[in-house]
Image: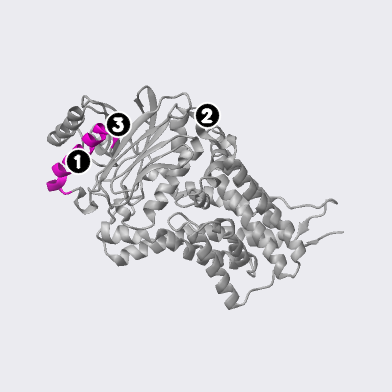
Amino acid sequence: MSRQGPATLFLTGALFVLSYALGTPGYDVPWLPFVCLAPFLALAVSARSARHAAFRGWIAGTAANVPLYYWIAYTIAVQGKLGWAPGILAAFLVSAYVGAYFSVAAAAARHLEGRFGERGLWLFPLVWTAVEVARSHLFSGFPWMLLGYTLAGSATLRQAADLAGVHGLSFLLALSGVSVYLAGRRLCDRAPVKAAIPLIPGIAVILFLVLYGRSGSANPAGFGARVPEVKVAIAQGGIDQSLKWDPGNQLATLAIYGELTRTARDEGAQLVVWPETAAPFFYGWEAGLSRRLEAIAVSGGIPILFGAPWYDPGGGGKFYNSVFHMDARGIVLGRYDKRHLVPFGEYVPLRPVLFFLNKLTAGAADFSSGTSPALFRFNGQPVAASICYEALFPPLFREGVLEGGTWLVNVTNDAWFGDTVAPHQHLAMARMRCVEFRRPMVRAANTGISAVIDADGGIATSLGLFRRGVLVAGIRPGTGETVYAKTGEIFGISCSILAFLAFIFPLRGSHGIRMDGRENIGA
């Protein structure tokens, strides 16, 4: 492809930034995810070298991610009370970090095209998936808003996530992007008839997603048809983050949740779920407040799942972000300790080096990670619990499902995000977990967005941001295992291996002659 002039380069970059960002949850412009990688490939392939493509990819990737992560500035400046300068810097640094993965993808695209010609770009979906897999695991993992999540809002298109997870959807969207780019390239070369050929894979992707999403194979009804329905309530307290940990507000907070719990009972709920750290004290250690909480369950005559911090004096004394299962007698039947913590939010990584930094959550000490999944039992059915940020990590949910979990609970405190795009993104990622494992989810958020999510990712009922109230809905626990539940991350790992091999082994033609660029080299 010919080199681009400055104006064309700027317009191509702007087209990528807008199409990539505006297709994500919270902006939700439809169909952009299928074409957004086409201008990205144009930027990469027209670079004079792989190194130059890497630089372009980093600039474009950073710019495209700023609209996705600007909320970090609000979290640090307002909720963390550290000021706007550190907040803006943090939002930029996170965007730049994620942009580094785009840089790798751009360099790989330029290398593939330079080595194998345009046919090499058909390997790009492997590279994109491998890069997203790396982002999901390196440095504890930051898989916030992978490309596949852009389909979370479509009742039809998201259903294929039960085959290979969100990475499978990312692969298909990357394939569509390659298809659109190559078709556009031929149109620019004034070959409109030939442009139809590379469009075939892109059209096939859309047809597959539509047909699968509307077929019986994607219908979750069979996953829980014989399991009795459970009527569950969510209590959304709407407690402002600035008041949440104020000692003078603790009794008022419990009074609010007590009233909401009684309302849920009166509406026929069998179980009430409170959000993450809805009880803003160390349950079991602060005796007076703990007894008041237990009295809510007893007086209401209803079991409660509630979030609260927990202190374990054993092992040197550790702090945990936990969710408890309390029965109608006020007796705790189980506890789950959050396993995947938020860096700098709940702990400071590399503490000996970054000793001068403090985490954003209340208290000076870091939280510790839990060690195992927890299955609470309700009405004879196992319930798999998770907390906040863990909604981004499918393997955590897979463990609970494989151990017998028939429905999911996710408690969260999205008050940190304010009225930004982040609560909508967080909800979208939680919805994808339901599709991947065909399990309904009860998602309780302190200030919203709380929701009861069906096994197909649809929202049965929800309560918006900064509202106080109760949601009551019937859920049908799921049984059986999806393809993704059985195979886990095999698809993403396979893509990573194949992408690696594409750079190790040369491509050879029918005569055993190595292909390098667009021409045969050899005899």
The quadrant in which the C terminus is found is bottom right
User: Which quadrant of the structure image shows residue 290?
Assistant: top left
Residue segment shown in magenta: 246-273
Q: Residue 238, can we see it?
A: yes
Does residue 144 lie above or below 401 as drawn?
Answer: below
Residue that mark 1 sits on: 281
Q: Main secondary structure of the magenta part?
A: helix
Given the image, on which type of amino acid does mark 1 rest?
Phe
Q: Is residue 71 left or right of residue 27?
A: left
Label whose residue precedes the other's in the sequence (1 or 3)? 3
In the picture, the disc for residue 222 is 2
- Label 3 residue SS: loop
Label whose residue precedes the other's in the sequence (3 or 2)? 2
Residue for point 28% across, 49% down: 447
Given the image, on which type of amino acid does mark 2 rest?
Gly
Residue that mark 3 sits on: 269
Q: Residue furthest front?
A: 267
Q: CA distance from mark 3 to mark 2?
A: 25 Å
Q: CA distance from mark 1 to mark 3?
A: 26 Å
Residue for point 64% across, 65% down: 45
Does residue 126 lie above or below 222 as drawn?
Answer: below
Q: Nearer the viewer, residue 28 or 280?
A: 28
Q: Nearer the viewer, residue 215 or 204?
A: 215
Given the image, on which type of amino acid does mark 3 rest?
Ala
Disc 1 + disc 3, Cβ < 8 Å: no
The x, y position of residue 328, in whole percent, is: 23, 26
